């Protein structure tokens, strides 16, 4: 989806400064218009299943008595009233048929706390990918229980997948007990907010370092993997070992040297082909276990 917006927004996130202590949403972000602000979402041809939408859901809180304006595919401008109150609100907007573009306008400064939109169609599997690049995951505890519970009421998630860890792995790290302690808190935090939702952790993958003339598994990865297994066991959630799925110890060089290559020569990151392969391995494992559950 192509995302464009005006430059008169105030924002904060888990990964930025938040000097005003603005309440972050489920994505770890918040946006506040500064008057006559706008945002536009336009579908692309990257995925056939995502070429259009028939429902737009806007999530917000703490709204002033006011209205926003919206239009679909450059058509006539329409208005919608915002609900006041501190709880998370959901505003549902529907085009006459299928749409490819929606533009939202926010005429009032500090009109509300806005947390994003969901572009949907009537049926299908919905995946909300909430990236926190460079984050260890422990900051998720900063999102308040009340906000998470409000979103839970609207989203009714069936599965939460947590994939963190590589960003704390380093040659100087030998003790991950603090990470184990904090991530257990995060998982319990999510369990309390989403009591009917299953939770699955994805482990760290192999990361290689040069030793002599060879590339071998960074020993910190092995320690971190054990820590993540302990987290899953103590928090009583499922764990999928990406490390084992890709071949275990010293597997990253094989992915780098595959034909075609599946990882970059930094021996840390997958390329597009490698990411697609990991996704397929995960999906096959998930569906196999789901079949056993049924």
Image (cartoon, helix red, strand yellow):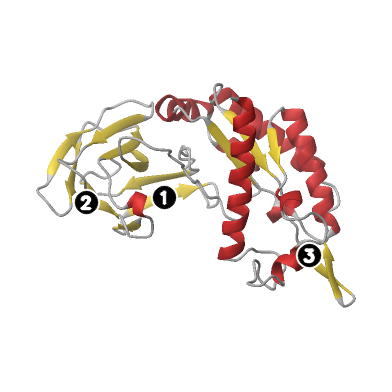
Camera-nearest label, 1 or 3: 3
Q: Residue furthest left?
A: 76
Say which of marks 3 and 2 sits in front.
3
Q: Is residue 275 left or right of residue 178?
A: left
Compared across the picture, whether 131 is left or right of 292 comes to left
Give the left or right position of residue 185, taking residue 197 as reference.
right
Q: Residue at x 43, y 38 (%)?
A: 125
Dot 2 alpha-carbon crowd within 10 angstroms: few under 14, some 14 to 19, many 20 or more: some
Q: Indicate the position of residue 52 as horizontal and vertical percent values.
A: 27, 49
The residue under label 3 is 208
Q: Secondary structure at mark 2?
A: loop
* Residue 286 placement: quadrant: top right
Are circles 1 and 3 on residues that touch, CB within 8 Å? no
Q: Residue at x 26, y 33 (%)?
A: 92
Compared to residue 112, the image places residue 192 above or below, namely above
Q: CA distance from mark 1 to mark 2?
A: 16 Å
Label of residue 11 in the image? 1
Q: Secondary structure at mark 3?
A: strand
Mark 3 packing: few (<14 Cα in 10 Å), some, or many (20+)? Answer: many
Q: How busy is the neighbourhood of tag 1: few (under 14 within 10 Å), some, or many (20 plus)? A: some
Q: Is residue 139 visible?
A: no
Quadrant in which the C terminus appears:
top right
Residue at which label 2 appears: 36
């Amino acid at each position: 989806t192509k995302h464009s917006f005006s430059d008169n927004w105030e924002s904060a996130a888990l990964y930025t400064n938040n000097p005003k202590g603005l309440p972050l949403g489920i994505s770890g972000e918040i946006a506040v218009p500064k008057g006559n602000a706008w945002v536009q979402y336009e579908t692309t041809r990257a995925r056939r299943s995502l070429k259009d939408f028939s429902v737009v859901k806007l999530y917000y809180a703490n709204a002033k008595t006011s209205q926003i304006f919206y239009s679909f595919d450059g058509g006539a401008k329409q208005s919608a009233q915002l609900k006041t109150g501190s709880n998370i609100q959901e505003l549902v907007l529907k085009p006459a048929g299928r749409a490819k573009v929606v533009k939202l306008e926010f005429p009032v400064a500090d009109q509300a706390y806005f947390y994003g939109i969901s572009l949907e169609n009537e049926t299908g599997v919905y995946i909300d990918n909430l990236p926190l690049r460079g984050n260890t995951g422990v900051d998720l505890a900063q999102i308040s229980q009340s906000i998470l519970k409000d979103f839970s009421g609207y989203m009714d998630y069936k599965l939460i997948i947590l994939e963190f860890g590589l960003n704390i792995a380093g040659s100087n790290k030998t003790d991950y007990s603090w990470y184990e302690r904090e991530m257990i808190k995060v998982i319990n935090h999510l369990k309390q907010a989403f009591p009917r939702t299953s939770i699955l952790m994805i482990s760290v993958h192999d990361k290689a370092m040069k030793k002599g003339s060879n590339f071998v598994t960074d020993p910190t990865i092995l320690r971190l993997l054990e820590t993540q297994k302990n987290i899953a066991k103590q928090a009583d959630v499922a764990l999928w070992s990406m490390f084992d799925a890709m071949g275990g110890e010293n597997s990253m060089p094989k992915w780098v040297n595959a034909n075609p290559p599946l990882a970059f020569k930094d021996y840390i990151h997958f390329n597009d082909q490698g990411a697609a392969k990991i996704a397929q391995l995960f999906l096959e494992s998930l569906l196999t276990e789901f079949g056993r559950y049924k």
